[in-house]
Image (cartoon, helix red, strand yellow):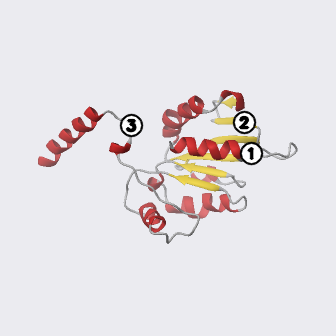
Amino acid sequence: AAYCQVFNIILTDGEKDPRAKPAAHWHVSKTMDLVRDEFWPELLRILPEKYIVKIDNVRLKVYLRSPNGRSIISCKSADKPANLRGRGIRSLSGDEVAFWRMSIWDNVLRPMLGDSRGKALLCSSHKTGWFSSLHKQAKEGKAGPDWAAFMATIYDNPHFPPEEIERRRNLMAGINAR
């Protein structure tokens, strides 16, 4: 569902001026393996073919043209911060953000969204640290009017079989009992 929201932003926020560079939208995961194994196949599966102009499987980029303009989705990794620096981006989806260094968000990615007033969707499994503090501030309304926080558990996932949840619960109970 989160990916659908990101794709909606991308398809409605393209660059309309044919002389300008296409609008840049980034997906940043904790590692490039996560990008290649999880996000990239899902991106190619879910994007409407009628908007795809070109797919670059080497650089992990998709070039799009929608009625709202031209866009490029680029997949990046947070494990090499130097590769994240560059021009402004229109939107960002971040995966496993709690496992990024705080400086990647504060000093690199957030400023890149600033000039375009871009949007970010930051997702992560739980880990105590800077991201959990940010999530708490957003949930309490202290991060600013443009912030919102949401939380879902494995029980909220309609694609996760209930019998697998029970199997994992039993396995963890055995481990915790030791």
Q: Nearer the viewer, residue 71 or 112?
A: 71
Question: How many discs mark residues in the rendered view?
Answer: 3
SS under mark 3: loop
Residue 169: x percent and y percent? 22, 41
Residue 12: x percent and y percent? 70, 45
Q: Is residue 178 visible?
A: no
Contact (CB < 8 A) between labels 3 and 2?
A: no
Contact (CB < 8 A) between labels 3 and 1?
A: no
Residue type at numbered disc 2: Leu
Residue 134 vs 12, above or below: the answer is below
Density class for disc 2 (Cα within 10 Å; few <14, some 14-19, many ≥20) is many
Residue 161 vs 75, above or below: the answer is above
Residue type at numbered disc 1: Gly
Density class for disc 1 (Cα within 10 Å; few <14, some 14-19, many ≥20) is many
Side of 103 where 117 appears, left or right:
right
**Among the 4 quarters of the image, the one containing residue 120:** bottom right
Whole-number angstrom distance, CA of label 3 to CA of label 2: 30 Å
User: Between disc 3 and disc 1, whose residue precedes?
Assistant: 1
**Residue position for label 1:** 14
Q: Nearer the viewer, residue 15 or 41?
A: 15
Density class for disc 3 (Cα within 10 Å; few <14, some 14-19, many ≥20) is few
User: Between disc 3 and disc 2, whose residue precedes?
Assistant: 2
Residue 97: x percent and y percent? 48, 53
Residue type at numbered disc 3: Pro
Q: Is residue 56 visible?
A: yes
Q: Nearer the viewer, mark 3 or mark 1?
A: 3
SS under mark 1: loop
Q: Residue furthest left?
A: 178
Side of 1 where 146 appears, left or right:
right
Contact (CB < 8 A) between labels 2 and 1?
A: yes
Q: Nearer the viewer, mark 3 or mark 2?
A: 3
**Residue position for label 2:** 64
